[in-house]
Image (cartoon, grey):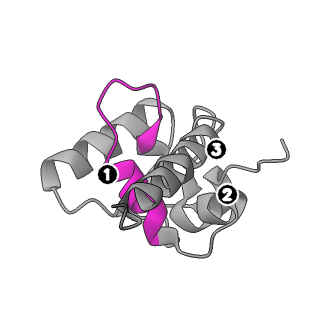
Amino acid sequence: MNDGHDNHEKIYDNLFEAIYEIVKRVPCGRVSTYGQIASLVGISDARKVGYAMNSLERDDGVPWHRVINSKGMISLRDPFMAEVQRQMLGSEGIEFEGDSVDLSAYLWDPQE
């Protein structure tokens, strides 16, 4: 008997794959937001982008560190990983003003 659980997993797998493909397009030296990625994938819930980023393996080739929140801030709860993300962005030339990135300077334009 199928309770629909398998279908939900397939939907999330497909959604997460679509999210990963968009994130892979964010170039070095640019950031995107959870909301921007959600919009480009065609969903309204930016949290699903966060869930997708959280489920990544370390060496899967998706530049997860380039996705930040709409205030230009890192949203990771783990302080160690938040610092890793900050350092990775810094190594790509992205500068922080306090705890945030100037989105007007670093936000990725998908039309570029």
Q: Amino acid at mark 2?
A: Val
Magenta stretch holds residue 58 = yes
Q: Residue at x 60, y 63 (%)?
A: 38
Give the x, y percent position of residue 69.
46, 66
In the foreground, 64 or 16 = 16
Q: Are marks 1 and 2 in contact (CB under 8 Å)?
A: no
Residue occupied by mark 3: 22
Question: Which comes sooner in the sequence, label 2 or label 3?
Answer: 3
Q: CA distance from mark 1 to mark 2?
A: 17 Å
Q: Residue at x 27, y 59 (%)?
A: 76
Reply above or below: 71 against 98. Answer: below
Q: Are marks 1 and 3 in contact (CB under 8 Å)?
A: no
| Disc 3 residue crowd, few under 14, some 14–19, many 20+, Cα 10 Å | some
User: Does residue 30 appear to the left or right of 78 in the view shown?
Assistant: right
Give the x, y percent position of residue 5.
36, 62
Indicate which disc residue 54 carries. Answer: 1
